[in-house]
Image (cartoon, grey):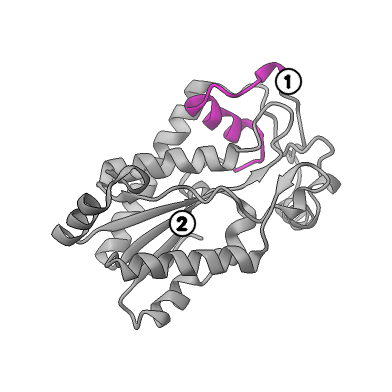
Amino acid sequence: MTEIKSQFDPNLRKIIKKKKQIAVVPVGSIEQHGPHLPVSTDSDIVTEIARKLSEKKNFLLLPTITYGVSFEHAPFFNLSIKESTLSTVMIDLCTSLFANNIKTVFVINGHHGNLKPLKNIDEKLRKLSKNKLKVFPLSYWHFMQREFDHAGFVETSLMLAISKNVKMKLAEKGLLTDGMSQQQIKDLGRLAEKSFLKVTKNGIWGDPRKATKRDGQIILDEIMKNLEKKCQTCLAGHSSKVHQ
């Protein structure tokens, strides 16, 4: 793995010139995650996943874009940028990578609100580069079997596996969808995209109280295994659909 931010210019240019490089760009958010997880949770998790992926595959790791589209969490704390801003930043960044002769980019997304602005950036960049730049937007939760949550069992377990900045004594039960139909859950999801407060008063979707570091490591290992396979498929040119 080559971590871009710690490199010096002559060495970095030498690395890029010597071999065709693949870049990884993690994208997270700064937003509330209940009383027990830090507002950096999405960025923390996706940074670790991108680091592990880059280390395993010997990719170039770029600094995490820590701000995302999180307006739906107001009046809970969030630091948000517009969808158009995130889309523009990603297009500019990937274009800049291309100008530095890096022609393959994996964008690893860690926040649901970023899905829309990241959608179709691969097609836009392919057109801009005349089919010379390949960009693959991938959201990490698509690579695990468990139902994803927000500050619930899954995210809390993942944070316990990668960080010491978790206050389990403050963990509370949030919105539980057990017994609900898929349509009801889907409707709640749509409402949460507009206002998280309207579906869960404490900002939690799920129940984090039984989360453990061990569960987090199991989930993280599953994500990494499936994500690595997906990246290999993308590079082999056999990917018909990208998990955004």
Residue named by callout 1: 170
Tell me the distance, in whole angstroms, between the alpha carbons under discs 1 and 2: 32 Å
Q: Amino acid at mark 2?
A: Leu
Say which quarter of the image contains residue 167: top right
Residue 11 vs residue 156, the one in the foreground: 11
What kind of element bears circle 1? helix
Say which quarter of the image contains residue 127: bottom left
Instruction: Specify whether residue 223 is in view.
Output: no
* Residue 107 lies in the magenta-colored region: no
CB atoms of marks 1 and 2 within 8 Å: no
Label 2 packing within 10 angstroms: few (<14), some (14-19), many (20+): many
Label 1 packing within 10 angstroms: few (<14), some (14-19), many (20+): few
Residue 176 vs residue 58, the one in the foreground: 58
Residue 138: image tag: 2
Vertical comparison of 93 with 198: above or below: below
Percent position of residue 63, x then y: 44, 48
82 relative to 123 in the view: left or right: right
Instruction: Specify whether residue 22 is in view.
Output: yes
What kind of element bears circle 2? strand
Residue 50 vs residue 239, the one in the foreground: 50
Name the residue at 38% across, 53% down: 24
**Boundaries of the magenta span:** 148-169
